[in-house]
Amino acid sequence: MNATPEDIARAAALLRAGELVALPTETVYGLGADASNAQAVAKIFAAKGRPADHPLIVHLADADGIVEWAREIPKEAIALARAFWPGPLTMILKKEADVSDLLTGGQDTVGLRVPDHPVALALLRAFNGGIAAPSANRFGRISPTTAAHVAEELGESVALILDGGACQVGIESTILDLSRGEPVILRPGMIGADAIAAVIGRRPRLPQHAENAPRVSGALAAHYAPRTAMRMASRAELLDPIDPTGEHAVLSHSVESPGDQPGPWIVSGPDVAHFAHDLYANLRALDASGAQLILVEELPPDAAWDAVRDRLGRAVVGSGGE
Ligand code: TXA
Ligand code: MG
């Protein structure tokens, strides 16, 4: 972890001056701007190439900040903040009147989260305000989980990249909409429906088709996508000698390379935490390997893998495009 107290002070000053700063969180790296400065927020959309109707998450130093951004805050939000913050849960709440439309994509709600990363928390405390931050990738591409990935994605358009090492969780936060009376998971993450139900006493539902689009870009059918074509493959397929030409790359959670496989073969797992932690770095490496096709082993069916399944499904749909 390389960010020093001086780096953090500089980053806070840059945010105050309306510049963009990339910051590590426990999920993925974020592209941060002063959430209360509309011009700074506009720079995020320009840097990412992100459509204006996709709202940004506001990151806070602690749960006390909720009242500055949201109104009509349900008791369930307070209970969830106590249980999971700092941590990989974003809550969608009705927004305070003065929260800018630019930030919320013109909606009446705002997404809030307290990230669980010492560098992010130190920056939030030094800055002493909300930091708007989407994942620090170009729109539709693989989210960055190291400072080097951020430099590859957005190097030119960010004033400073704070290095906080590799992200612990590795995939984006769970997004829970609490603004409609009934809790709805808009984007699955490593905090699952069961864990949420254990805190609030009712099970959040998953959105109906298209209910959350385009509000959650992660809900677009194609997202998180490598440039190389990609598809799921069964365990049986991977146990066969599939690729004499060396044009295939493999990402598996359970099957070792047969040895005579000439293309790159990554085994990641067997547990989901490990698989998620390395997922985006692995997709980047396989994408850069020169392979013509990335084969990903079909995932275990249990709910613990749902968030990873969601990301891979969208990556498959988006893969191979330019
Ligand atoms: O783990 C994360 O959530 C990372 C780190 C940096 O915190 N951030 C992240 O941001 O994934 P982003 O912008 O890449 O994805 C956030 C998603 C977007 O799809 C956005 O549309 C949705 O959250 N979102 C934000 N505010 C919303 C709102 N008010 N209503 C519905 N969806 C919202
Ligand atoms: Mg994103």
Image (cartoon, grey):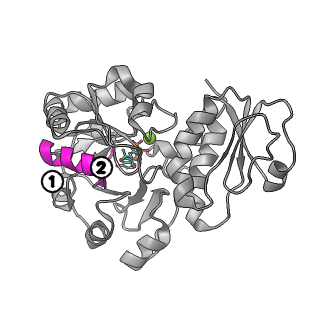
- Badge 1: residue crowd in 10 Å (few <14, some 14–19, many ≥20): some
Q: Whole-Å distance between the Cαs marked 1 and 2?
A: 15 Å
- The reply, left or right, for residue 57 in relation to residue 229 is left
Q: Classify the position of the C terminus by image quarter.
A: top right
Would you place residue 219 above or below residue 236 in this image?
A: above
Would you place residue 253 above or below residue 129 in this image?
A: below
Does the magenta-highlighted stretch encompass residue 256?
Answer: no
The three-letter code of the residue at mark 2 reads Asp
Q: Position of residue 75 (x, y in %)?
A: 26, 72
Residue positioned 35% across, 63% down in the render:
178
Which secondary structure lies at badge 1? helix
Would you place residue 2 above or below residue 154 in this image?
A: below
Q: Which residue is mark 1?
A: 68
Q: Earlier in the sequence, mark 1 or mark 2?
A: 1
- The reply, left or right, for residue 39 in relation to residue 195 is left
Q: Which residue is mark 2?
A: 108
Give the foreground label among 1 and 2: 1
The span shown in magenta is 106-128
Residue positioned 61% across, 28% down in the render:
288
- The reply, left or right, for residue 302 in relation to residue 261 is left
**Residue 209 in sight from this viewpoint:** no
Does the magenta-highlighted stretch encompass residue 107?
Answer: yes
Q: Position of residue 142 (x, y in %)?
A: 52, 37
Question: Where on the picture, by quarter, is residue 103?
Answer: top left
Foreground: 298 or 315?
298
Residue positioned 22% across, 56% down in the render:
70
* Image mark count: 2
Q: Position of residue 38 (x, y in %)?
A: 21, 32
